[in-house]
Amino acid sequence: MYYKISGVTGRLAGSTPAGAYYPQGLKPTLPSPPAPMIFASPTKVVSEAGAVAEYLGANKVPELQKIFQKADGVPIHLKRGVMDRLLYRTTMSLTIGGTLYCLVALYIAAQPKKSQ
């Protein structure tokens, strides 16, 4: 015997096999056809664009690989110089300052209220 929850009473009731597998009247349907695609401007087919890709700048990957793969003992997040050090130190100081601020706030919140 098959069971499903009755939509009227909210209790478990006997059901047909099809009713148990598709509760609350949900039936499988055919997918709707996709809507036609609308473009504001004409598009190019890949074959029309040609095989040459146009880039806005030069390829910097080989230069960056040389910088980052150099074995000079400097951590990877500090390899690019002054800006990396400045960003790292700013991040660390904000982290330490935020931790101290949280500890002070917890200390103040843990103190009992002064009755006057």
Image (spheres, rainbow, N blue to C red):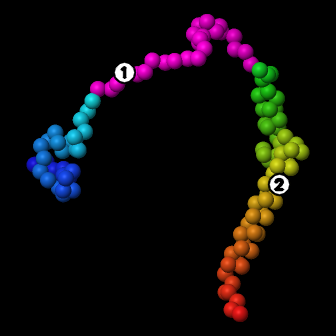
Q: List the single residue furthest toward the right.
A: 82
Residue tagged by mark 2?
Answer: 90
| Quadrant of the rendered image containing residue 98 | bottom right
Residue 115 x, y percent position in the rendering: 68, 92
Q: Are marks 2 and 1 in contact (CB under 8 Å)?
A: no
On screen, residue 48 above or below 8: above
On screen, residue 85 above or below 98: above
Q: List the single residue furthest toward the bottom.
A: 116
Of helix, strand and loop, which mostly describes the magenta segment? loop
Residue tagged by mark 1?
Answer: 33
Residue closer to the observer: 56 or 11: 11
Residue 39 is one of the magenta-drawn residues: yes
- Looking at the rendered structure, the kind of residue marked 1 is Pro
- Looking at the rendered structure, the kind of residue marked 2 is Thr
| Quadrant of the rendered image containing residue 67 | top right
Q: Locate residue 113 relative to residue 63 in the image: left or right.
A: left
The residue sitting at 74% across, 74% down in the picture is 104
Residue 83 x, y percent position in the rendering: 86, 44
- Within-10-Å neighbours for mark 2: few <14, some 14–19, many 20+: few
